[in-house]
């Protein structure tokens, strides 16, 4: 990896866009008079490259022990949408549709556009003050597309398709396909990629009537992620995503007989416990986040459903109907914004190594207690 430190020419495809950089995949680096494929993603600090574009960049390439492991600060960079091929071509077309939908979203949600765009696509549209408010509210997880979003979207498609057919061999593959397309428009992020891989393999096994052990399946998906990109292990998003998923899978048997309200609270609390070690290490922790998250998810669900339905309506040419649906969801966004403002004023705990140690111990104890299933050797 260190052999790439220096000034190089680079070509590739911009998969994810952030405020001042893109994350590129399918990268090739010109070295020793030939193009060599790079097996890792590259972070490129440039505003001249847009998501969905194939690009050329010339500049200084450096290695960092993080994800992505290679970072470029180009002297020159340019991109175009005409040379993408294969999956990159599909992603590029979805990115163009995303831009078209974002215009419709901005026009019809107005003051709530940032909330919608970040909720649906994880786009970094919040200004610094709003971003800090969301961070302190303990609801930042709503604005990073993850298993929660994938599950909500998959449920919507499954319900809609069930009106036309009850066949699982049609419903599950179609719902899965549409959910994968949605996740692809978000990058996909490590957490969204984990969720769609888990969903796809789960549905395939279910259709084959193959026995499934959820924690083993999660381990399989994690292994596939690491085989494709080992440095993703250094991504906080990756670590928090799998910690939360493992915890939620582990507690399912223990909470299945509780009522819906108690189940929602226990799920929220367990997810909070699983990610709190990382938050105590890297960010701030809102101690009331488990309580606030339950109504926040209830508000975010119709916003996400309305947005996804509006995408479909826009795709089939019903732009006015899509606009009406988006405007109808803005009251939920108004309430969610008030909830964020209220929650941001509650007790926050900043980075703390002692609390990191304590929360890690609680998380591991929770995971062991609910996830450990010893066999009765005396029976």
Image (spheres, grey):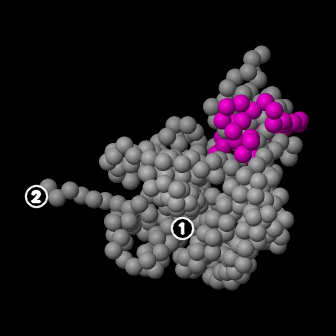
- Towards the viewer: 64 or 298: 298
**Residue 332 found in image quarter:** bottom right
Residue at left offset 67%, top offset 26%? 37
Q: Earlier in the sequence, mark 2 or mark 1?
A: 1
Q: Secondary structure at mark 1?
A: helix
**Position in image of residue 106 (x %, y %):** 82, 64
Residue at left offset 72%, top offset 36%? 89
Q: Secondary structure at mark 2?
A: loop
Above or below — where is 58 with respect to 308?
A: above
Asked whether the beta carbons under mark 2 and mark 1 sit within 8 Å of each other, the answer is: no
Tag in front: 2 or 1:
2
Q: Which residue is mark 2?
A: 378
- Towards the viewer: 22 or 88: 88
Residue at left offset 56%, top offset 60%? 160
Check if residue 77 falls in the magenta segment: yes
Residue at left offset 33%, top offset 74%? 257
Q: Which mark is residue 288?
A: none
**Residue 4 found in image quarter:** top right
Say left or right for 68 vs 9. Answer: left
- Does any portion of residue 227 appear in the rendered image? yes
Range drawn in magenta:
67-95
Check if residue 147 falls in the magenta segment: no
- Does any portion of residue 285 appear in the rendered image? no
* Distance from Cα at disc 2 to Cα at disc 1: 38 Å
**Position in image of residue 72 (x %, y %):** 78, 39
Say left or right for 37 vs 248. Answer: right
Q: Which residue is mark 1?
A: 276
Where's the C terminus, which quadrant?
A: bottom left
Above or below — where is 249 with respect to 197?
A: below
């Amino acid at each position: 990896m260190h052999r790439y430190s220096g000034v190089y020419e680079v070509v590739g495809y911009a998969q994810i866009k952030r405020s001042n950089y893109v994350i590129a995949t399918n990268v090739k680096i010109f070295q020793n008079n030939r193009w060599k494929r790079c097996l890792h993603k590259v972070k490129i600090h440039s505003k001249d490259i847009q998501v969905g574009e194939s690009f050329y960049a010339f500049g200084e390439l450096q290695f960092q022990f993080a994800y992505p492991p290679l970072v470029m600060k180009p002297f020159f960079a340019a991109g175009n949408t005409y040379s993408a091929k294969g999956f990159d071509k599909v992603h590029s077309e979805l990115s163009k549709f995303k831009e078209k939908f974002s215009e419709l979203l901005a026009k019809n949600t107005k003051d709530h556009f940032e909330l919608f765009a970040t909720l649906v696509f994880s786009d970094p549209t919040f200004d610094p003050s709003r971003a800090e408010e969301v961070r302190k509210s303990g609801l930042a997880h709503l604005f990073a597309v993850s298993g929660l979003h994938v599950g909500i979207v998959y449920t919507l498609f499954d319900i809609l398709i069930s009106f036309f057919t009850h066949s699982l061999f049609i419903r599950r593959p179609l719902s899965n396909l549409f959910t994968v397309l949605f996740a692809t428009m978000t990058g996909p992020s490590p957490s969204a990629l984990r969720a769609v891989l888990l969903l796809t393999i789960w549905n395939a096994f279910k259709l084959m009537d193959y026995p499934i052990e959820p924690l083993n399946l999660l381990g399989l998906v994690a292994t596939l992620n690491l085989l494709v990109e080992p440095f993703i292990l250094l991504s906080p998003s990756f670590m928090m995503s799998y910690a939360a998923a493992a915890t939620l899978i582990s507690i399912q048997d223990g909470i299945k007989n509780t009522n819906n309200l108690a189940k929602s609270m226990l799920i929220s609390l367990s997810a909070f416990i699983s990610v709190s070690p990382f938050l105590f290490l890297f960010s701030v922790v809102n101690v009331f986040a488990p309580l606030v998250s339950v109504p926040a998810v209830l508000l975010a669900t119709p916003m996400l459903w309305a947005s996804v339905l509006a995408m479909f309506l826009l795709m089939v040419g019903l732009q006015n109907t899509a606009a009406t649906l988006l405007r109808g969801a803005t009251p939920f966004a108004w309430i969610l914004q008030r909830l964020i403002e209220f929650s941001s004023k509650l007790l926050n705990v900043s980075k703390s190594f002692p609390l990191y140690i304590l929360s890690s111990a609680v998380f591991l104890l929770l995971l062991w207690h609910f996830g450990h299933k010893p066999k009765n050797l005396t029976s």
